[in-house]
Amino acid sequence: MREAKGALDSANTEPALNACIGNRPHDRAVMPWTQEADVQIADAMTPNPRTVQPGDTLQTAAQLMDELNVGVLPVTEGSRLVGILTDRDIVIRSTSAGQDPRTATVADAMTGEVRTLPVDASVLDAIRMMKEQQLRRVPVVDPVGQLVGILSLGDLADAGTPEAADALEAISTPAEPER
């Protein structure tokens, strides 16, 4: 498993969970956004998130999630983002299907088509995309598509962006059960 500095927020977007991260610029001081359209997501994102690789076991990924107190891990090959794995992916796509987490791999449960944001996107662009796509977190990539960070609703709330509350409400609309 490839490790880098940093961590990700959990599926729960409460700011208190983000306090354990410690390497984001806004952990040192709350940034009062005066012109959100001009603020880049690089100022709010969690840089250099920990990742897993497609061949890692789901048990290894779950242990890392537990260690970091997060609910999502980017999946990379080298520095190229190839997917994303959530705790829900592990439960729904693997455990409920009877797979053994000691032998099932990240590739068996991950989401391969991942929406990303460019590192130079504005906070308002990020919020707009997150609301439209109902995303709680979005990987951030550099101009050549390499993972450089992850942006969560919690990051936006911690950074003091006033639109984060509206985004959380729009994204948290409960889905209808499939029955």
Image (cartoon, grey):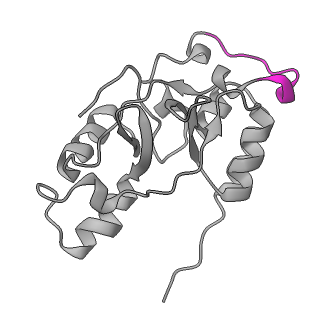
Whether residue 164 sits left or right of residue 18 in the image: it is: right
Residue 51 position in % (x across, y down): 35, 35
Q: Quadrant of the N terminus?
A: top left
Compared with 76, 54 (above or below) is below
**Nearer to us in this view, 125 or 10:** 125
Compared with 33, 28 (above or below) is above
Q: Is residue 158 magenta?
A: no
> Which residue is at a point 39% across and 59% down the rendered structure image?
88
> Which residue is at a point 64% across and 39% down the rendered structure image?
117
Q: Quadrant of residue 109?
A: bottom left
Whether residue 174 sits left or right of residue 167 in the image: it is: left
Q: Is residue 38 magenta?
A: yes
> Which residue is at a point 47% across and 48% down the rendered structure image?
11
Which residue of the protein is positioned furthest toward the top in this rendering?
Answer: 28
**Nearer to us in this view, 83 or 132:** 83
- Main SS of the magenta part reads loop
Q: Quadrant of residue 92?
A: bottom left
Compared with 117, 143 (above or below) is above
The residue stretch that appears in magenta: 29-39
Residue 114 position in % (x across, y down): 53, 52
Q: Quadrant of residue 112?
A: bottom left
Which residue of the protein is positioned furthest toward the bottom in this rendering?
Answer: 179
The total of numbered circles placed on residues is 0
Whether residue 167 sits left or right of residue 25 in the image: it is: right
Residue 133 position in % (x across, y down): 67, 57
Compared with 171, 64 (above or below) is above
Residue 140 position in % (x across, y down): 58, 34
